[in-house]
Each structure stands twice: as structure tokens, then as C-alpha cells.
Image: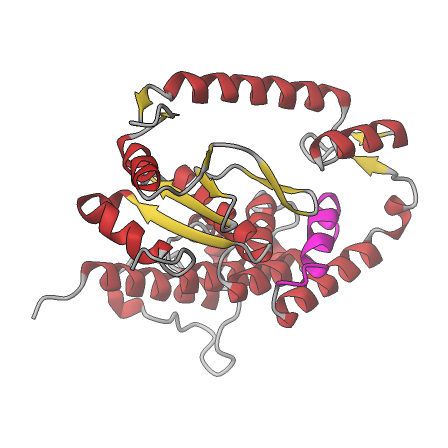
Amino acid sequence: MASDPLKVKQHQERERVRALSHLFDPDPEKPNEIAASALALPLPEGLTHRLGAARELKEFIGSSFADVRRLAASALGKMAPEQPAPDFLPRLVELAENDPHPQVRQYAAKAIGKYPKAALLFVDPLKDVARDETAPGYVRTAAAEAVAEIQKANRSRIALLNHWCTRCRRIIDEEQYQTSMERWGRAYCRHCSDEKEFENHDFESKVDAAKAKRTTGGTAVQSWGEKRIAEFLEREGIAYEYDERYRISGADTIRPDFYLPEFDVYIEYYGMNTPEYNANRRRKHVLYQRAAKKLVSISYEDDARLVEVLRQKLSRYVGGLA
């Protein structure tokens, strides 16, 4: 019986990360033994080449497998004594904020706390995680402990800081902080705020230009999958709003493909499979979860049975569809 290629890949990635982790946290009884060396995967040449493992582990925190991301985040935390200026902290912060798997968020927060001097610029996102009431207690605790370590290590620097731009990290004054928070829900300097405005305008223009397909009801949509979803809703007499922006919780805004106001249900059609697209998909899913919103997710992989899958999933919230 042939092995499942996906499971084989997951196993190889997991054992590879474990092997790299042993470079920083070896078995005290066998300090020179590397785990899983029998997999015939190339390993750094002994303990003198441990720093080279950081490059690989940075790749593994972007793995599609949650257990690999968790192990990689943990290993990056273990290498802190030998990595004084890490360039992977932004990616760990992203995992701590948005990863759909709580244990990945927990270990990412723990790893960030191992680099308190370098992590000062990321203390605000960690505070958000520590205050996130939808997160498990162990995630919030890990984030709070990381914040405490960062503040302890940076007391003198914190006393000099007021607010800083979340994009370029320039210090900004109180007026600009209040203005940007009101406009964006994030702290931006004037330059980055202008860039954000331009990017939003450019994005809106591209989205509008992509809406080249019309449903039978006259709605302009971007893809054939969205067209089939819209026409299903039109046939069933279900009112919908397409591609509008909503504030769903605090400063969090979302732009779903469809919103059904009568049932307070969101529908997302995921029509691509690229690393950047999938990362954005995970972030949106986390936002829906945090806000406890009703979400129906449809993928391009469902295209052959799109209407059947949509009807089945939507029937949980809309009567008369089953």
C-alpha cells in the first residue's frame, strides 16, 4: 500500500525540525547525537554549525503543517543565546497573532519572549494577544509573559517612547497616533498613513476592474465561483451584500465575498492556492473565529459540486435549504 505523500512530507519536516532543535537543546546523556539522522536528510556539521540552522527553521515556521510550525517556533526560541539580532521576529509575531492553531500561537509567543531586547517594537501586538478573550488561557498567558520579559529588559528605553508607527516603527506624536487610530485602527506615521491610503485606493481600483462577470441579477463579481454562489442566492431569494467592508470586532475589519444580513452569515470563496493567498485566508479565518461570526467557506476544490456543497453548509444557518 502506497504511502500518503502528504503524510510523508509532514513526517520528514517534523523530524527535520526536531533534528535541528537538538542542535540547541541536545539530550544531556547524548550531547552529540542528532535525532532522526537515519532519514538521510543533510544536517549541519555538528554543534559548531548551529547558527546555520536558523535559516532552515525560518522556512519551517511557514510550513503548512501546524505541528511543524510549533516545533520550529520552539527551536527558534531555544537558539536565543546565539542569535542576538533575529530577523524572524515579525514572522513569529504573525504566528502569535493569527495562526489558527492555538499551540502554534503559544510557542510563537514564548519564542518572542526569548528575545526581549529585539522584541520591543512588537510589544503592542503581543498585548493584543494577551487581551484576546477568544484565545485559550495558555496562549494569553504565554503572550503576557513575553510582554513582561520585554518590558523588564527595556525599562529605560520604554520610558523614552510614546507611540510608534506599526509599519516603519518611527516614533509618532499623540496627535498623529489618535488620528491614525481613528482612521485605520492602527498607529501609522503621516508617511505610512498616506501610503496606506494610496494602497487602499489602488486595491479598490484593481478589485473593481476585476469585476467583469455579471450574475443574472445584475451583480458584477470577480470569478466564476462567486458568480455561481451569487446566482444560487438569487434563485433561493436570499438577500446578500457583495464585497463590502464590515467592522466585526473592535478595530478588526473584514471584507467578505458575501454577507447575508438576514441571517448574519458570511460566505468566503477561496479561488487560489498560493502561499500569500493561503496566509491571508488563515488570517481572515482567525478574525471570524475571534468575533464568533457564522462563516461558510467554499474552495475552488469544491467547484465540481459547488452548489451542493454551498447548500449543505448554508443549511446550518438558513432554513428550507436542506
Residue 261 percent location from the top left of the image: 52, 44
In-front residue for pair 309/45: 309
How many labels, in total? 0
Q: Which residues are magenta?
A: 116-134
Say whether residue 98 is magenta: no
Would residue 156 appear left or right of 225 to someone viewing this image?
A: right
Mark yes or no: residue 130 visible. Answer: yes
314 above or below 175?
A: below
Quadrant (top left/top right/bottom left/bottom right) for the N terminus: bottom left
Say whether residue 129 is magenta: yes
Residue 151 percent location from the top left of the image: 82, 55
Q: Residue lying furthest left in this view?
A: 1
Would residue 90 appear left or right of 250 to someone viewing this image?
A: left
50 above or below 191?
A: below
Quadrant (top left/top right/bottom left/bottom right) for the C terminus: bottom left
Name the residue located 87 percent from the left edge and 39 percent from the top edge: 161
Where residue 133 sits, quadrant-wise, is bottom right
Name the residue located 57 percent from the left edge and 23 percent from the top edge: 200
Please name the colour scheme applied to the rendered image.
Answer: secondary structure
Name the residue located 59 percent from the left edge and 60 percent from the top edge: 77
Mark yes or no: residue 118 visible. Answer: no
Would residue 321 appear left or right of 199 to someone viewing this image?
A: left
Residue 127 percent location from the top left of the image: 74, 54
